[in-house]
Image: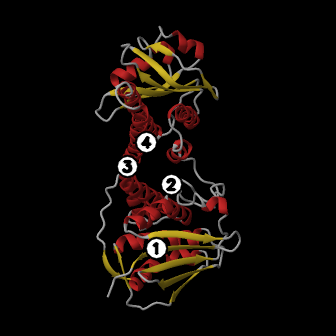
Amino acid sequence: MADKSSKPHDPFFDLLAGTTAETGEKFFHNFVKHLAQTYHAQFALVTELLEDTPGTARTLAFHAHGNNMKNFEYKLQDTPCECVYENGLLYLKSGLQEQFPDDHDLVEMGVHSYLGMPLYAKDGSKIGHICVLGINPVAESASAIDYLHIFASRAGAELERIKVERQLLNQREKLAQMVDEQTVELRISKELAEAANRAKTDFLARMSHELKTPLHAITGFSQLMKEETAGRLNPVYKEYVDSTLSASYHLKSIIDELLDFSVLEIGKLKTNIKPHTIKPLIDDSIRMVTNKAREKGISIHYDEQSDNAAQIMVDDARLREIMINLLTNGIKYNHENGSITINVQATENSYCISITDTGTGISKVEQAKVFNEFERLNADQDCIEGTGIGLAITKRLVEHMQGTIGLESQLGRGSTFWVEFPAVKP
């Protein structure tokens, strides 16, 4: 049986985790490092097409033999990069130097294979390109081209953000001559922040949708194999199919989280807030996580201290999502054979729902950032899965429905997460 503690290398999530907090030069330095590692290439670079100098590109980051090198400008003529800018995707498994005999840098670098792809702006224009060059073939797996699309989309979003930033900075210089410098600074800072957020959100939404299509195929064919519609499977292959299905369901939950996050980021979440009875919503949420709790031997207790007919103003589907997120976290960070207690208490104008677990607890330092996006507790522990945006989504959902959320925790003694929503007035 395979060791379940060892996880497969996933370039998409490595890229997301390794670059999501960075922008500009730091982003591109980390980006080319991930690019080279993914393709086991000696060289990786990302360039920008110079608008004021036709036929010339400038490197935004250049990775060579494990090191970040100094950026430079170069002429595209008679290089493989020129083919990428003119024709799109270019892959040469071998014979690179023979194909481009006038590109003397290829000889100096000692490379024989090449994989490159353009970077596109939202309007479809080519604004740059990424590529890897290797002594040996750099794209041996069937998914190599698919992953390059993901890398190119992420780099393109950041490059376009930088271009917007440059335009805004140029505008700032002009505006500074006419209006007060402090007023301009505030306006430009706000626009730069909004541009950065839009670029990251667009990337998350675009990639989440693109990943769902092949994932549906993986899940569908795996389910057919599990049902043995084409013939019986031996026990080993049954285990492989079960592992594939489990991984695809987990990946779907991650993609759904990314989609929720992108929708919340751009403020397009639609809710239907009206009176709902608390008890049925909590009962439904408990049923949804019962199997996951049973796998770890965790018992869930619902301590009903309030009126069973108590009502709050929420969107019922979103409250279930909030409860399932909090219950799942309570299970994930709990001890084997631990417990979770749900308590509902009435205040003067609201109801507070608390979820208390018997898990590891959260330190004061971690509590301060637990609701930040891409902050995952105990991220160094491979046995704990997640993207680090579940609690960030939960907080935004709660606040979108005019509620509040908080936590109390102590290391070694578990945690209590609570949400509070307006009560329905009789």
Residue behind mark 3: 205
Residue behind mark 4: 193
At x 36%, y 46%, the residue is: 206
Classify mark 2: helix, strand or loop: loop
In the image, what residue type sits under mark 4? Ala
Q: CA distance from mark 4 to mark 3?
A: 18 Å
* Residue nearer the viewer, 307 or 259: 307
**From what the image shows, is residue 162 above or below residue 307?**
above
At x 31%, y 36%, the residue is: 122
Labels 1 and 4 touching (C-beta < 8 A): no
Residue behind mark 1: 323
* Residue nearer the viewer, 45 or 114: 45
Which badge, 1 or 4, is on the more N-terminal residue? 4
In the image, what residue type sits under mark 1? Met
**From what the image shows, is residue 101 above or below residue 42?**
above
Q: Which mark is residue 96?
A: none
Q: CA distance from mark 1 to mark 2?
A: 18 Å
- Of the 4 image quadrants, the one containing the N terminus is bottom right
Residue behind mark 2: 373
**From what the image shows, is residue 7 above or below residue 391?**
above
Coordinates of residue 194 in the picture (x, y in percent): 39, 43
Q: CA distance from mark 2 to mark 3?
A: 15 Å
Coordinates of residue 247 in the picture (x, y in percent): 50, 59
At label 1, counting other C-alpha atoms closer than 10 Å, the crowd grade (few under 14, some 14-19, many 20 or more) is: many
Q: Which quadrant of the figure has residue 322?
A: bottom left
Which badge, 1 or 2, is on the more N-terminal residue? 1
